[in-house]
Image (cartoon, rainbow, N blue to C red):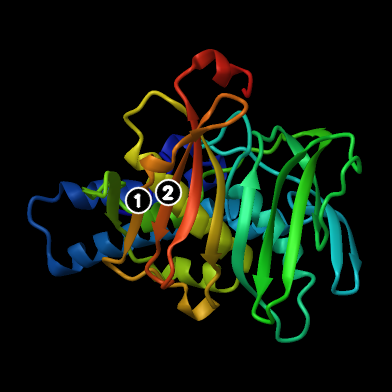
Amino acid sequence: MSFQLPKFQDLPDDLQQEIKPRLEELKVLGALPHKSNLELQRIHEVSVEIRRRVLEHVRTNFKPDSVISPKLGLQNVQITRYEKAVAEAQLFFTPWSENFVHGPDTLLSVTNLAERLMKPNEKLAQLVRISWRQPIKYNLNLCVGGVPERGEFEEPVVLDGAFVTNHQRLLHFYATETDTAIDVQSSNNPFAQQILGNYSVGKAFYDQGNMQHVQTLQALGSDMIEDLQTSAPSRMATITEVIALGVANILGHRKAFRLMAGFKGIELPEAQDFLFQENDSLGIRFLHNQKRQSRMGFELLPFEIALSYQKKAATGLLAYTLDSELAKKFL
């Protein structure tokens, strides 16, 4: 199943006026009791054209690379040769995260800034690790190529981690919040929605007391493949979003406040290899025997991640609580 398109009334006025005649034509053709082959072909052509225009609207309003633009992305970028880069990163809310930003969407800016430090023929190869320390409500002061020193910032570090490149160069990164609140709204990541298809939880079974789930993924349509092939930030954000959504699907019935606390060992494939094929799968194995409690009172649940394109399992950490009062402190 493809991701859900916006309703007609939610489209901008100019796009409504553009596709309204086509919708009326479809209505007339659809009412015909007996349709000729030409009429059936016309129905198909008009339907495809309407979908194409709406998809263009969706990708324009949430094309992951759009946050790379001066309007939404990195500002005041300062680069020291190939060693260190700092910038102000402007984030955005989505229907998946309406009150704060947490998780994969932050990786758009992080990966974008890291790419600016690549030497000739060098590429980001793997997200070695990332930790999200708290929900983010403000834009970020972002640094790639350095580690925060104790007492360096008045504000706490809200995320940190590291990439490794195909040259085996390790690039640490971290971010603190600015004093500018996030005020941009975007739609959900359409690539992740497409890959996860109908959000089926899939098969579940126990392995040494740990619950394991396997979810079938959907192949991307050809109209989406080019966007992901040309952008490492888009691929990084989409891979991690697919994992986060997969975890959310499994736990969707539970009344808990959940946050993705971190990932380790997620490879960033070459552009031409990033094509989830039909019937590829995402495996999530919750390690309940390693669950522990954080100092803030959250339950921390580790899990293993089996991705179709990489041989070694990646890992993740989920933070959750059933205590509504504790959750309110972070909202």
Where disc 1 sits, the SS reads: strand
Q: Amino acid at mark 1?
A: Arg
Residue 50 shows in this picture:
no
x and y percentages locating residue 81 in the rendered image: 90, 74
x and y percentages locating residue 151 in the rendered image: 90, 40
Q: In the rendered image of this protein, does residue 67 appear above or below residue 176?
A: below
Quadrant in which the C terminus appears: top right
Residue 108: quarter of image? bottom right
- Mark 2 highlights which residue? 303
- Mark 1 highlights which residue? 285
* Disc 2/disc 1 C-alpha distance (Å): 5 Å
Q: Residue 273 or 146: which is nearer the viewer?
A: 146
Residue ranking furthest to the left: 34
Using residue 150 as the reference point, say whether residue 6 is left or right of it. left
x and y percentages locating residue 207 in the rendered image: 25, 51
Q: Residue 208 or 100: which is nearer the viewer?
A: 208
Is there CB contact under 8 Å for labels 2 and 1?
yes
Where disc 2 sits, the SS reads: strand
In the image, what residue occupies the spot 38% across and 23% down?
Answer: 255
In the image, what residue occupies the spot 84% across and 54% down?
Answer: 87
In the image, what residue occupies the spot 61% across and 57% down?
Answer: 129
Q: In the rendered image of this protein, does residue 201 appear above or below residue 228?
A: above
Residue 248 shows in this picture:
yes
Badge 1 density bin: few <14, some 14–19, many ≥20, Cα 10 Å: many
Using residue 281 as the reference point, say whether residue 79 is left or right of it. right
x and y percentages locating residue 26 in the rendered image: 28, 51
